[in-house]
Amino acid sequence: MMTDKPAQRPANPRFSSGPCAKPPTWTPEALSDAPLGRSHRAKVGKDKLAAAIQQTREILGVPEDYRIGIVPASDTGAVEMALWSLLGERPAEMIAWESFGAGWVTDVVKQLKIEAEVKTADYGQIVDFAQVDFEKDVVFTWNGTTSGVRLPNGDAIPADRAGLTICDATSAAFAMELPWDKLDVTTFSWQKVLGGEAAHGVLILSPRAVERLENYTPAWPLPKIFRMTKGGKLIEGIFKGETINTPSMLCVEDYLFSLDWAKSIGGLEGLIARSQANAQAIWDFCGERDWIANLAEDEATRSTTSVCLKFTDERITDGATFAKAVAKRLEAEGVALDVGAYRDAPAGLRIWCGATVETANIEAMLPWLDWAYQAEIEALSEAA
């Protein structure tokens, strides 16, 4: 007999890992001041873009001598700009422990054909950074959005490194402490932790990265959309809001709202605390059950944003089918949307716990996960 359904439902069932839930105070009216139909080159557009850059700097604590640019094509565009513009001056070391990191490996090794050593780890694990050669340029993700693992800190990155560190931080920025002195290039999309609208990326360059750009010319041609220098000098306008291509001022307005919301809850400290509370609720839930576990094997490397789970019940012989059935049942009830594991990841669930998610909604959803699991186990028993 099927277990009774829980009485309480989440007020917001959106637990997608990207695009992510909007800030809890967001309404469409929040975008009413967007300068629609106006040029982004007009003063009003430039002021909005410059404000987005400055508020990003303030909340993330980015040093004043680091450049911040809003670039096209989301986090992917920001990473590609860095790879194509900066790599090739010296050998590279490519670090991958999930699907997006693996994608950067493909770009560097197969497309750019740069001399590179590749270090990988299985889903649920990370590469030992003590074994990484920072004399080379090192490319890595901070948080594995599809694997639920993260770097616990940047302690293993030497201050006196010869190479550049290029960090895809898209599901870490605004939810985890990033050691700016250890990062030369940092990229993210504001559609993650701040729940902004898609299509725009953010690229942050250290002085060392700028020096590389101004003193090294790649052997391959650069598309216009990637070019950050002219005549051997950085195009400073990119990092003042003079974007390479036309940005959506509606999306910029949405980002500004999210940044204001972030300040209202205590800035970076408040954002981190919310993400940690969300993730902890799920960890506690898993700790009390023997049929579900965190995909991350080491507690120190557990992601606090993209929490990835696996079913451990030995009665489950087809993990992928079972996980999809649970996710489908949760969606059909309207209590958890888009929580299936990423297509390239091990079978299971992925629940976004970034700061825009309310802990109360996580806590209201978890009994439904209990219910969906029990219902699918009963279905398996009946089928047998």
Image (tube, rainbow, N blue to C red):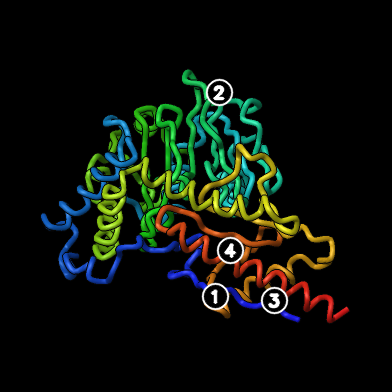
Specify the amino acid type for callout 1. Ala
Q: Number of labelled discs?
A: 4
Q: How many neighbours does mark 2 have within 10 angstroms: few (below 14), some (14-19), or many (20 or more)?
A: some
The residue under label 2 is 135
User: In this rendering, does residue 30 appear at all?
Assistant: yes
Cα separation, mark 4 vs mark 2, equals 46 Å
At label 3, the amino acid type is Thr
The tag on residue 366 is 4
Q: Is residue 215 above or below residue 139?
A: above
Relative to 296, is 89 above or below?
above
Of all residues, the one furthest to the right in this rendering is: 384
Is 7 in front, or is 333? 7
Other-residue count near label 3 (Cα within 10 Å), few / some / many at <14 / 14–19 / ≥20: few
Residue at 37% of width from left, 63% of height from top? Answer: 22
Q: Are marks 4 and 2 in contact (CB under 8 Å)?
A: no
Name the amino acid, label 2: Glu
x and y, in percent, of residue 64 in the image:
26, 31
The reply to whether discs 3 and 4 touch (Cβ–Cβ < 8 Å) is no
Q: First in sequence, mark 2 or 3: give its number.
A: 3
Secondary structure at numbered mark 2: loop
Residue beneath disc 1: 7
Residue depicted at 77% across the width and 57% down the height: 312
Given this view, does label 4 or label 1 mark the residue nearer the observer? 1
Q: Quadrant of the N terminus?
A: bottom right
Which mark, residue 3? Answer: 3
Q: From what the image shows, is residue 251 above or below residue 132? A: below
Q: CA distance from mark 3 to mark 4?
A: 14 Å
Quarter occupied by the C terminus: bottom right
Secondary structure at badge 3 equals loop
